[in-house]
Image (cartoon, grey):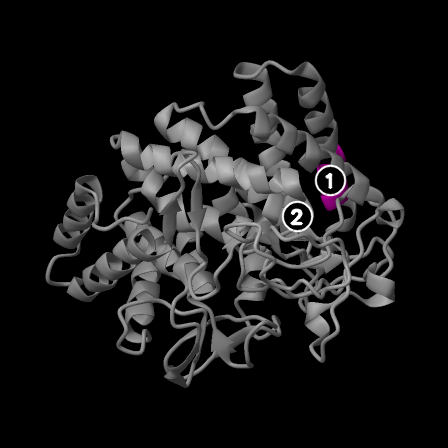
């Protein structure tokens, strides 16, 4: 069952944002209302078993990552709206149902209908749309379960599926600390090298560092080197959530012990191997490393990325290494930073050259304390929506009428979250 109309609580919130925007930022309000309503009306499907399925938008599948980001801004309203909280809890339950089917998969079908990339050379089944292993696909559902609890006090999402899914996630994280011993392989017969893993589906060689390996980036493009630093940062954060949940709510000491150990080892790996230097000789975080001395100086637009670290709860936006990293990545030193006539920001290997992503622009806004900078970015986002009043995946910095993905719910909700952030309305962490 989909939403036929906007709940009163959501309509009231949209009205509050409209009033805060006033005449000065009426264009923000127009886009906010279009985007905030769009996700509920077009992507949410409530199932009879109490679970919730979320379309990513114009692809008929649910991504574990995207679905979390799509509902996150609604947590602010779910504090007062039991029905909205139940919808989000239903999403967590659906996410962990899927994780129990396969913790290596990143996107799933609404039913066991065999849709998606069934010809990929990996262990597919009819539930799985795509099986690109990405650390963040496990981190995001844990984050949502925790944030739902923090913002509403709700605990029914911590059910048997949640517990068994956490055990599987911890097992995968630990297994992938030594990827050589992993059973995971992925190959796709394609001309597009970013859609497959080299080395017989194992990816580029790595040596153990304490960090946990990822086959793909949050863009669904293959990692150049297997230790994706921002995703390991996110893992450190959610392992802390697991410790709190299984200490104070579920009381399972063995899970607490395992999560603490993993958190410590991954953090030590980031400290020892996750940094490099920029052209000015400053210490910055690398995007990817292999434990053998190779490192990439770059950032991708998809979250988790390095710019997003403080937003995700890793460190502070005033940390010296973070600030040096951020400055480097928001410059031409990042091969995916583009600046043109209408916009500037971070793009991706996933879209054409000179295409920046509203997701990355919104994240840039949410990780600066500078209100004027937030305002600049919001103005740029509404000015480059190609008249649709919605966000897209990426667009040409010199011609915003050229864009990818007409209907992309994650981008819409990141814009909404930046508007909320500008008015100091934030999800409790």
Position of residue 391 measured from the top left corner of the image (x, y, whole percent): 36, 67
Dot 2 corresponds to which residue? 135
Magenta residues, dominant SS class: helix
Dot 1 corresponds to which residue? 173
Q: In this view, does 317 lie to the left or right of 4?
A: right
Q: Quadrant of residue 7?
A: top left
Report how far apart the C-alphas of labels 2 and 1 lie in the structure.
8 Å
For the point 22% across and 44% down, which residue is it?
10
Position of residue 43 measured from the top left corner of the image (x, y, whole percent): 37, 55
Whether the residues at callouts 2 and 1 have beta carbons within 8 Å, the answer is: yes
Give the quarter of the figure containing the C terminus.
top left
Q: What element carries label 2?
A: helix
Question: Relative to 37, does residue 10 appear above or below in the rendering?
Answer: above
The magenta segment: 265-271
For the point 68% across and 52% down, which residue is it?
125
Which of the pair 277/187 is nearer the observer?
A: 187
């Amino acid at each position: 069952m989909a939403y036929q109309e906007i709940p009163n609580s959501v309509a009231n919130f949209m009205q509050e944002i409209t009033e805060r925007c006033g005449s000065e930022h009426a264009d923000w309000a127009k886009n906010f209302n279009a985007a905030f309503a769009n996700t509920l009306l077009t992507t949410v499907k409530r199932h009879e078993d109490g679970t919730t399925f979320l379309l990513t938008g114009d692809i008929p599948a649910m991504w574990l990552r995207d679905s979390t980001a799509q509902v996150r801004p609604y947590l602010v309203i779910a504090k007062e709206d039991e029905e909205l909280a139940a919808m989000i809890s239903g999403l967590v339950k659906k996410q962990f149902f899927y994780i129990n089917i396969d913790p290596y998969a990143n996107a799933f079908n609404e039913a066991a209908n065999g849709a998606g990339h069934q010809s990929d050379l990996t262990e597919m089944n009819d539930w799985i749309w795509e099986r690109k292993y990405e650390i963040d696909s496990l981190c995001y559902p844990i984050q949502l379960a925790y944030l739902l609890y923090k913002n509403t006090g709700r605990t029914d999402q911590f059910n048997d599926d949640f517990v068994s899914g956490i055990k599987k996630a911890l097992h995968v994280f630990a297994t992938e600390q030594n990827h050589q011993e992993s059973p995971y392989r992925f190959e796709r017969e394609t001309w597009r090298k970013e859609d497959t893993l080299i080395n017989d589906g194992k990816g580029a060689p790595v040596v153990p560092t304490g960090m946990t390996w990822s086959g793909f980036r949050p863009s669904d493009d293959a990692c150049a080197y297997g230790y994706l630093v921002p995703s390991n940062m996110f893992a450190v954060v959610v392992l802390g959530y697991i410790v709190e949940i299984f200490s104070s709510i579920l009381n399972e000491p063995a899970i607490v012990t395992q999560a603490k150990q993993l958190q410590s080892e991954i953090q030590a790996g980031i400290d020892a191997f996750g940094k490099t230097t920029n052209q000015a000789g400053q210490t910055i975080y690398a995007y990817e490393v292999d434990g053998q001395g190779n490192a990439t100086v770059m950032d991708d637009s998809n979250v988790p990325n390095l710019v997003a670290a403080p937003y995700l709860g890793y460190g502070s936006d005033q940390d010296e290494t973070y600030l040096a990293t951020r400055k480097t990545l928001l410059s031409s030193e990042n091969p995916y930073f583009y600046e043109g006539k209408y916009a500037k920001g971070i793009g991706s290997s996933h879209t054409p050259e000179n295409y920046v992503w509203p997701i990355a622009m919104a994240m840039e806004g949410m990780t600066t304390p500078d209100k004027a900078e937030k305002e600049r970015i919001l103005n740029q986002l509404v000015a480059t929506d190609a008249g649709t009043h919605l966000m897209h995946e990426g667009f040409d910095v010199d011609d915003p009428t050229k864009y990818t993905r007409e209907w992309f719910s994650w981008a819409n909700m990141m814009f909404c979250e930046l508007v909320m952030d500008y008015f100091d309305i934030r999800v409790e962490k």
